Amino acid sequence: MELIEILRDCNRKRAFVFGVGGGGDIVSTVPVANFLKLFEFEVIHGGVLWDRLIVDPKPGPRALEELENIEKFNEVVAFVRENTRTNYGAVPNLARSARHFGEVVALDITKGARKLAKGLEEFMDESGIGIVIGVDAGGDAIAVGYESGLRSPLADAVSVAALSEVDGIVSVTGFGGDGELKLEELMFNIAEIFKRGGFLGCSSLSYGDSREMTGICDLVVTEASRIPIMAYSGELGVKRIRKGRTVLITPISALIFYFRARAVFEINEVARLVKDCEDLEEANRVLNKNGITTELDYERSVSDFKVA
C-alpha cells in the first residue's frame, strides 16, 4: 500500500504522532506509533491541549500560557511532563499520559490553524521529523461539517487545516467511536477521499497495542479511544456512551485508516472555513455563522467555571 512506500522512502526516521481532537486521543496514537516503529521510526507522541470538562473544568482548549511546568518550543508547541498543570490546578490528559510515555508534545490550537501549521513546520524542521500524523478517535476529522450528529468539529478542523499545510497524514481509528458520525457517513466521506487520491492504506490493532492502550486508559479519561480496544477483544454491537449517544462496535473499529491531509481538507468544509482565521475565537464565530455549533459552544453553555 502507498503508506508503506512513504515510510520506506522517508529519509528522516523520526515521526510526530498526535491526537487531533483533544487529550484523550493520545491513547489512539499507540497503534500508529507502533506501526511506524516497524519501519525503524523513532516516534514522538503528542496531542491537542483540549480536555473534557470532567478533566479540565474551564471551557475550551488551553493556551500554553495557561500551563505550568512545561518547556516551550515555540508559541504553539511545548513539551509536557507528568507534573504539568494548568494555572488553576487541573491536570491535563497529556500530563497524565506522560506517566506512560515520558515527555509528550502539547499543541496549542487557540492561536489558529495558520500559526499551528507554522509552529508544526518549525518543530519538524528543527527536530528532524520526516512524518507527521494526526490521529482521530471516532472520525470527526473526516467529516464534511453538516452531519446531523456532529458535535465536536472545531479541534479536528483546526488540526486538519494545519496538517494540510505541512503535507501531513490524517489517521482515523475506532470508526464512529465518539457517537457522532454514522458508519454510512464515514464510508461516504472515505469514498470522496478515494476520489481525490487521498487514501494511503490501513493497519490494525495488535495484541501489544491493545494491552498498551488499556494501560494508558487507566491514566487518562477517554471513551472514543476505548472503542478499538473493545472491538479487538471481540465485542460486537451497540454501546451507550455519554449524553445518551450510541456507538456501533464492529471489527472495523479495530482498523486504522490513513489519508493524505490535503485530500481530507478538500472534503472537510469546516477545516476550509477555519483555515485562515486569526485564532480559535474567530474560527468559532465563522462556524456559528455557517450554522455549525461546536464543542466550545457546548462547554460554554454548561460550565460554571470560575477561577478561585
Image: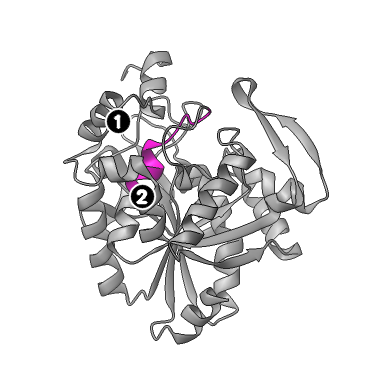
Q: Amino acid at mark 2?
A: Ser
Residue 80 visible in the displayed image: no
- How many C-alpha atoms fall within 10 Å of the one at disc 1: few (<14), some, or many (≥20)? many
Outermost residue, left side: 278
Q: Is residue 150 magenta?
A: yes
For the point 27% across and 40% down, the residue is 273
Seen in the picture, residue 166 relative to 217 is either above or below; the reply is: below
Identify the disc placed on residue 287. 1
Which of the pair 105/118 is nearer the observer?
A: 118
Which of the pair 253/129 is nearer the observer?
A: 253
Identify the disc placed on residue 18. none
x then y, percent, for residue 46: 43, 56
Relative to 42, 114 lies left or right = left
For the point 36% across and 53% down, the residue is 266
Which of the pair 129/5 is nearer the observer?
A: 5
x then y, percent, for residue 272: 29, 45
Q: On the image, numbered disc 2 is attached to which residue? A: 159
Find residue 296 and report its image quarter: top left
Seen in the picture, residue 11 relative to 94 is either above or below; the reply is: below
Q: Earlier in the sequence, mark 1 or mark 2?
A: 2
Outermost residue, front side: 195
Magenta residues, as a range?
149-159
Q: Amino acid at mark 1?
A: Leu
Find residue 87 and report its image quarter: top left
Seen in the picture, residue 153 relative to 291 is either above or below; the reply is: below
What's the image's color scheme?
one colour
Residue 286 visible in the displayed image: yes
For the point 73% across and 42% down, the residue is 249
For the point 64% across and 20% down, the residue is 244
State the quadrant of the N terminus: bottom right
Q: Label 1 to label 2, Cα distance in Å?
A: 15 Å
